[in-house]
Structure formats: C-alpha cells, structure tokens
Image: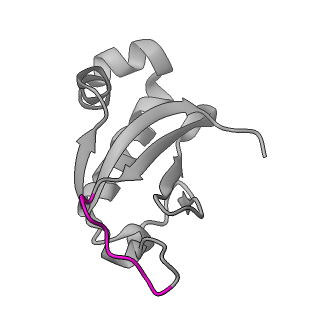
C-alpha cells in the first residue's frame, strides 16, 4: 500500500524514531514502526492483522490501527477516486493508497 501523510510534521514524526520517542516513548514508537511497515507491505486493509485494524462505516472511511501504550494510528483513504461498491461505499479491497492523519490516544468505546 502507498502511504502519504497529512502534514510534514506528522511525516517527520513517523519517520524519525528519536523525535517520536520524545513524544510517545519507545514502546509506542516500536509499534508505530511495525504498523507502518505492515501498511506498506499490505495489498489492502484485509491483509492487516496486528493492531486490530478497524474501518469506519462511512462514504470516505477512516482506518484505525492500535498501537502499544494506548495509542492509535488513524489513516484515511487517499485514492483520488476510490472505487465504490453497489451500496455507494468505498470498496476497501480496492484501496491502495492511505493518508496518515493522526497518532492519538485510543478513543474510549
């Protein structure tokens, strides 16, 4: 899968382990690096297992992936014209591009 980032500062945070460790700690950084590698290696979201990924039920879905230490990685579909199923929703099996939008504390359920 191809990844983009919502901002230069978020990209730097995801690519610079020392900077990320200052903000989140080593445990979170190690899981972040692993989940980003998983995303890059995946053909589609269904290939992911680690981090208990979930996809929001929306016309422009977001993907939430758990990280260690009570954080989560948030990504949005970044295909310019994502293919849709008969129900009008994005067909996640065809999504090949995501944009990382946030690293945040897990949302309470």
Q: Which colour scheme is used?
A: one colour
Q: Main secondary structure of the magenta part?
A: loop
Q: Where is residue 66 in the image (x, y as percent from the top left)?
A: 55, 47
Is residue 81 magenta-colored? Answer: yes
> Is 44 left or right of 27, judged from the image as shown?
left
Residue at the limit of the structure toward the bottom, as seen here: 86
Tell me which corner region of the image, top left, top right, bottom left or bottom right, holds residue 15: top left
Tell me which corner region of the image, top left, top right, bottom left or bottom right, holds residue 55: bottom right
- Residue range of the region highlighted in magenta in the rendering: 79-86
Image quadrant where one finds the N terminus: bottom left
- Residue at the (36%, 47%) spot, across then down: 34
- Residue at the (32%, 75%) spot, across then down: 83
Residue at the limit of the structure toward the top, as seen here: 22
Is residue 68 magenta-colored? Answer: no
- Residue at the (26%, 60%) spot, across then down: 79
> Is 16 left or right of 107, judged from the image as shown?
left
Tell me which corner region of the image, top left, top right, bottom left or bottom right, holds residue 32: top left
Could you say which is closer to the camera, residue 99 or residue 90? 90
When the figure is inspected, residue 19 is found, relative to residue 82, above or below; the finding is above
Q: Where is residue 86 in the image (x, y as percent from the top left)?
A: 47, 87
- Residue at the (27%, 72%) spot, across then down: 43
When the figure is inspected, residue 36 is found, relative to residue 106, above or below; the finding is below
Q: How many marks?
A: 0
Q: Where is residue 39 in the image (x, y as percent from the top left)?
A: 32, 56
Could you say which is closer to the camera, residue 29 or residue 8? 8
């Amino acid at each position: 899968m191809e990844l983009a980032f919502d901002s230069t500062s978020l990209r730097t945070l995801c690519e610079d382990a020392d900077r990320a460790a200052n903000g989140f700690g080593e445990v979170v950084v190690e899981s972040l690096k692993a989940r980003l590698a998983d995303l890059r290696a995946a053909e589609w979201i269904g290939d992911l297992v680690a981090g208990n990924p979930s996809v929001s039920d929306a016309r422009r879905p977001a993907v939430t992936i758990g990280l260690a230490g009570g954080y989560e990685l948030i990504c949005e579909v970044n295909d310019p014209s994502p293919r849709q199923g008969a129900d009008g929703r994005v067909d996640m099996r065809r999504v090949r591009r995501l944009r990382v939008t946030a690293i945040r504390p897990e949302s309470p359920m």
